[in-house]
Image (cartoon, helix red, strand yellow):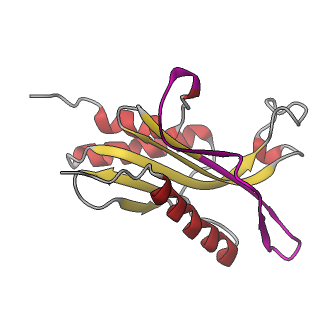
């Protein structure tokens, strides 16, 4: 069976379009996780109780991976889309010593990160935006757009999707 990847430009741009519309309408974005599991249509999980710290986020994604593993559901691909903060290290003093959410040079962004289970293909989109005093959003040109590209050692990103896949694939035996 020929499956459509959720890492494609078409799939992820549609997800970002809807996220932008929701952010403009609601003023905030509920983080989402899009999963390709089995041969079914992709699953969209709303992450309403999304934690704040990196350690809590790692545990949260590992728990999701474990839940799918217990249901004997192998996650083939995953895409995470969240609202967050970014600091460009080249333009900001002490960028690496302060959390982005606390840095005076921070910028709001939509962050979309996706990869396959083998970590051989990835998608990354970072879409900056600003809020006017009236809460109207102004979208800047994306500073990163990588769609369904091969993962090389130099462009590999480590993050919560690693925790998702590791927990989902743990103790899987072939036979």
Residue 115 locus on image (x, y percent): 44, 41
Residue 144 occupies which quadrant of the picture? top right
As drawn, the residue found furthest toward the top would be 153
Q: Residue at x 54, y 36 (%)?
A: 159
In the rendered view, does 157 fall on the left or right side of 169?
A: right
From the viewer's perspective, tell me whether residue 145 is left or right of residue 94. left
Whether residue 25 is situated above or below residue 149 in the rendered picture: below
Residue at 23%, 48% (x, y): give it: 73
Residue 56 in view in this figure: yes
The image shows residue 26, relative to residue 151, as above or below, that is below
Q: Quadrant of residue 55?
A: top right
Tell whether position 149 is magenta.
Answer: yes
> Is 23 included in the stretch rendered in magenta?
no
Please report the residue visible at 60 percent of the width from the left and 39 percent of the height from the top.
Answer: 54
The one of 43 and 1 positioned closer to us in this rendering: 1
Q: What are the residue bounds of the magenta stretch? A: 125-154
């Amino acid at each position: 069976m020929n499956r459509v990847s959720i890492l494609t430009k078409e799939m992820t741009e549609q997800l970002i379009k809807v996220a932008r519309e929701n952010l403009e309408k609601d003023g905030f974005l509920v983080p989402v996780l899009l999963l390709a599991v089995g041969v079914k249509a992709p699953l969209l999980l709303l992450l309403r109780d999304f934690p704040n710290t990196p350690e809590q986020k790692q545990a949260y994604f590992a728990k999701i991976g474990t839940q799918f593993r217990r249901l004997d559901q192998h996650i083939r691909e995953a895409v995470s889309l969240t609202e967050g903060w970014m600091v460009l290290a080249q333009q900001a003093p002490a960028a690496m010593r302060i959390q982005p959410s606390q840095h005076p040079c921070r910028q709001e962004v939509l962050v979309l990160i996706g990869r396959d289970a083998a970590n051989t293909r990835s998608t990354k989109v970072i879409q900056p935006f600003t809020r006017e005093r009236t809460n109207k959003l102004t979208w800047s040109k994306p500073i990163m757009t990588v769609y369904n590209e091969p993962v090389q050692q130099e462009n590999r990103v480590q993050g919560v999707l690693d925790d998702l896949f590791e927990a989902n694939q743990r103790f899987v035996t072939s036979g």
